[in-house]
Image (spheres, rainbow, N blue to C red):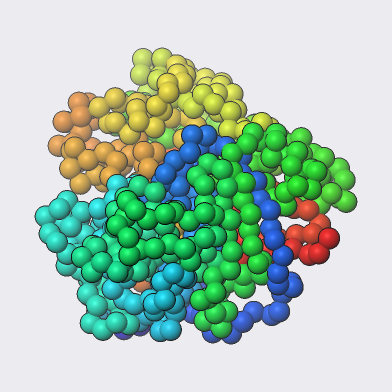
Amino acid sequence: MRYQPTISRYGLPSMAASPRVALLAGVLAVVASACDPAPATGSRPTPGPARGGVLTVVMPSWNGSELTFPTPKADGLDPQVNTWLDSAELFRCCLLRTLFSYPGRPAQDGGAELHPDLALAMPDVSADSLTWTFRIRPGIKYAPPIDREILAADFVRAMQREARVPNGQAWVYSVIDGFDQYREGKTTTISGLETPNPYTLRVRLNQPASDLPYRFTLSNSAPIPPSPDAAAAYGVATGHDSGFGRFLVASGPYMIKGSPQLDFKLAPDKQRPVSGFVPGSSLTLVRNPSWKPATDPLRPAYLDEMRITIGMSRDEAAHLWESRQADLVWLPSPPFQVQSWLVDKVRANRALGEVKVSSRDSFRYISMNLAVPPFDDIHVRKAVNYVINKRALVDSYGGGLGATIATHIAPDSLENNALASYDPYRTADYRGNLDLAMQEIRQSRYDRDHNGMCDAPECKHVLALAINSVAAQGGPVFLQMGSIIADDLNQIGIVLDVQTPKDVQGLASDPTRKVPLVLTMGGGKSYLSASSVLSPAFTAPATAETRVTACNPWCRHTLIGATPAQLRQWGYGVSSVPGVDSRIHECLLSSDRQRQCWTELDMYLMENVVPIAPYAVENVVQVVPPRISYSFDQFANSPAFDQIAVSAG
């Protein structure tokens, strides 16, 4: 059958008693209006801005990014290693094409709708959902110096390198049969990848994964051309386990300046890197002469050239923009991405340009360990959601410009805004409601006097971790946010011992540490499907030793779904915690209603499990000068450089 999801009507089990399920009819109506993966039209969009010109970009140093790390890192711009943040945009917009991709727009303009890219169409899927067949678009060539068509075997080569090069996203492809065995060195091929002919890629899975096309939007899966040396297992990437970004062969509308001079006939240690990428200093992209607009309906690619300067202070970057020496300040960090003083100046004087605010699809929340008293009681967990002052927490993001209120788990862009009006713990102006919180505490076994206060010994001196850093000038002060939460919880008798260790995520992800609360945890998507948030975060670990193998460290702190054997091994006093594995399996099994299924799971988690208390969805704040025609890419939470144009002057 052809993978072409449609949304069918579906009831919401186990939630009928909830007073908030009246929202469900509206939720389903919104979800049903969304076509999950949108087929490519094959036609060019309405003519846009004029082509040509040079865009100048400045990237301040930030240690959260391999590309802008204060000490230059060789792994910047490696499609299998440095796969997210700023690199994700450079790959999607400009350098690499993948089987599926997005049109470089915000979610409200279709930027979260999946389209075939190097795939000709949506895949054919077997009746058991375990065999997927992708047809490769013929006639697409790599950038110089590789004068060769992209073929199915090139995707296999990328998957092999993905399995063998250390990186944090290999878990995404563990659903492919034989991928993990190859990764562990037990086999010489990935058994689940087959190429029946040069233009057909067949993928066999070891478990259902209805979101497989979404996983093939990541740069990890972008094709790698073969090397002149037929024995080179990873093609032109062979011998470049570190620093492959300076030898990258493009397939998108742009290439790194100097790419035609790459000589892969030489031994890897004799090859000279491209001149246009100096890690920690500069990156210049120029047009790829092999790219043809008629074969790429997703990327108009207006610009002739992009000149990116890397590595200065945030103030220096802002002053370069202010003096018109730079068109954009680009930083993938939490808000503010540009200095607040510059934002204020532009808001006060529209002649300077515009302030653009978009959702970063990253959220902050309180993470609760479901195996640690008093948070092993769902009424306590609900009380936490009711009592926190979300407005004060969001105001910590530079007066609120840097974030919006979070009321559920997955970003709205991944659920077609189906839960945009959903708030199971609604309070006036999101400032918390002590009465509702106390009503929940009264139902808890930790309220011995039944007076709405958590008065058991387990409610005192509760260890709570917070990040001790300022994300950016004018942005959130995480320690201050931890203090706000501590004051809120104190109103219901939960007295926190707030600590700010250096490795908050490492401690939180170790179940033997028995950390009750993490106050400023951050989470987000790995790809543009709610499955990339909900599945890795709330699937039970496979073994008692497994902590964080399938996601960022924030995923495992709640211990959701942990087995009695795991809890015993980790030394917990409780014998069980809630789990949602069966619901996740259902969503991964069915391709015809996956967006609806994940939306329902989001609601179920918020009301029936309550592992977290979300409070803020971070924004991307950008200043745009008048000469720029701007677009935001929802996929990479970044300026969409293939959609941006510059005017003369």
Residue at 48% x, 66% y is 260
Q: Position of residue 450 (x, y in %)?
A: 43, 23
Residue 149, placed above or below residue 213: below
Does residue 567 appear to the left or right of 121 in the view shown?
A: left
Q: Looking at the image, which residue sits at the far left?
A: 186
Residue 138, placed above or below residue 308: below
Residue at 42% x, 76% y is 147
Q: How many labels sit on residues?
A: 0
Can residue 371 be seen in this snapshot?
yes
Q: Nearer the viewer, residue 584 or 353?
A: 353
Q: Quadrant of the C terminus?
A: bottom right
Does residue 574 appear to the left or right of 18 in the view shown?
A: left
Q: Position of residue 112 (x, y in %)?
A: 53, 64
Residue at 41% x, 46% y is 75
Q: Nearer the viewer, residue 160 or 589?
A: 160
Residue at 42% x, 44% y is 74
Does residue 108 appear to the left or right of 94 in the view shown?
A: right
Q: Nearer the viewer, residue 44 or 315?
A: 315
Q: Position of residue 122 (x, y in %)?
A: 40, 79
Does residue 525 appear to the left or right of 257 in the view shown?
A: left
Residue 183, placed above or below residue 523: below
Q: Position of residue 277 (x, y in %)?
A: 52, 51
Q: Quadrant of the N terminus?
A: bottom left
Can residue 389 be seen in this snapshot?
no
